[in-house]
């Protein structure tokens, strides 16, 4: 699995960080998503998928 973030779409809602803080953070200046682990271990995949589903801007996706 690979996590992809479209930072141009991100509105800084922070749902991804709340659901998966090991995978996501937000920029200090603008609140835009920062992917901390683009290729998470299998155990973190459900959290990554939940973050994708919860993103109000649809700025996140998972492939593979």
Image (cartoon, rainbow, N blue to C red):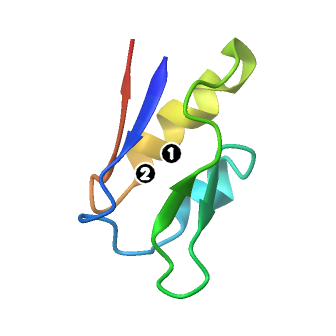
Kindly state the secondary structure of the residue where label 2 is placed. helix
Quick one: label 2, few (<14), some, or many (20+) residues within 10 Å?
Answer: some
Closer-to-camera residue (48/25): 25
The residue tagged 1 is 51
Which quarter shows the C terminus?
top left
Which residue lies at the image location 51% right of the left edge and 79% below the top edge? 31
Relative to 52, residue 46 above or below: above
Quick one: label 1, few (<14), some, or many (20+) residues within 10 Å?
Answer: many
Task: Give how far apart the Cα atoms at labels 1 and 2 are.
Answer: 5 Å
Quarter of the image for residue 44 reads top right
Q: Are marks 1 and 2 in contact (CB under 8 Å)?
A: yes
Image location (x, y in percent) of residue 21: 72, 52
Image location (x, y in percent) of residue 9: 24, 64
Relative to 1, residue 14 above or below: below
Image location (x, y in percent) of residue 24: 62, 52
Relative to 58, residue 64 above or below: above
Which residue lies at the image location 68% right of the left edge and 13% below the top edge? 42
Which residue lies at the image location 58% right of the left edge and 69% below the top edge? 26
Residue that sits furthest to the bottom in the current view: 29
The residue tagged 2 is 54
């Amino acid at each position: 699995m690979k996590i992809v973030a479209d930072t141009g779409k991100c509105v800084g809602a922070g749902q991804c960080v709340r659901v998966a803080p090991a995978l996501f953070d937000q920029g200090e200046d603008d609140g835009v998503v920062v992917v901390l682990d683009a290729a998470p271990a299998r155990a973190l995949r459900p959290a990554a998928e939940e973050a994708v589903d919860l993103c109000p801007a649809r700025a996140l996706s998972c492939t593979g």
